[in-house]
């Protein structure tokens, strides 16, 4: 956590610039389909629009889709299985229709990296992209 605390002391725009550059270089070198750890272990939030789109793609009624794939609590909806039901041989079977949380992960392209350190470090051992970006970030002279 010492490194995370150090990152918090640095200007956000400076950290973002370095992380963006590392991510652009490292991410293309990682074959996510050889890993799939995110799909095997993350809880994914689902919006109504995403559930509508995927249920339509799967030729299911929204009610049947919700019953089969979602866990609901108030206005929150989550995929009801870990690993993800749509993961097959480390590949997403609904890739073109995947949820925003899936598209966004590991979120190293988003601003304010040093404000998301808890979740980033939580995924450090899970995601080879995060692991490699963090390891290279440690070695950069700030």
Image (cartoon, rainbow, N blue to C red):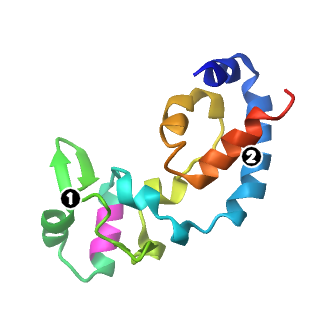
Q: Residue at x 71, y 16 (%)?
A: 9
* 1 or 2: tag closer to the N-terminus: 2
Quadrant placement of the C terminus: top right
Helix, strand or loop for disc 1:
strand
Q: Residue at x 79, y 39 (%)?
A: 17
Q: Residue at x 67, y 40 (%)?
A: 134
Q: Is residue 66 left or right of residue 127?
A: left
Image coordinates of residue 6 in percent, x first then y, are 69, 19
Position of 115 relative to 6 (above/below): below
- Count the marks: 2
Q: Which residue is mark 1?
A: 70
* Magenta span of residues: 50-55
Image coordinates of residue 118 in percent, x first then y, are 51, 30
90 or 52: nearer the eye? 90
The image quadrant of residue 18 is top right
Q: Which residue is mark 2?
A: 20
Checking the image for residue 103, the label placed there is none
């Amino acid at each position: 956590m010492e490194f995370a605390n150090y990152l918090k002391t640095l200007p956000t725009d400076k950290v973002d610039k370095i992380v963006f550059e590392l991510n652009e270089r490292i991410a293309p070198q990682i074959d996510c389909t050889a890993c799939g750890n995110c799909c095997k272990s993350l809880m994914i939030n689902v919006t109504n629009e995403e559930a509508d789109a995927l249920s339509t793609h799967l030729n299911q009624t929204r009610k049947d889709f919700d019953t089969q794939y979602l866990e609901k609590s108030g206005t929150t909806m989550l995929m009801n299985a870990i690993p993800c039901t749509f993961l097959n041989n480390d590949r997403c079977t609904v890739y073109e229709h995947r949820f925003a949380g899936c598209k966004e992960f590991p979120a190293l392209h988003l601003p304010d990296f040093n404000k998301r350190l808890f979740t980033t470090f939580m995924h450090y051992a899970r995601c080879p992209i995060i692991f490699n970006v963090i390891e290279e970030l440690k070695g950069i002279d700030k």
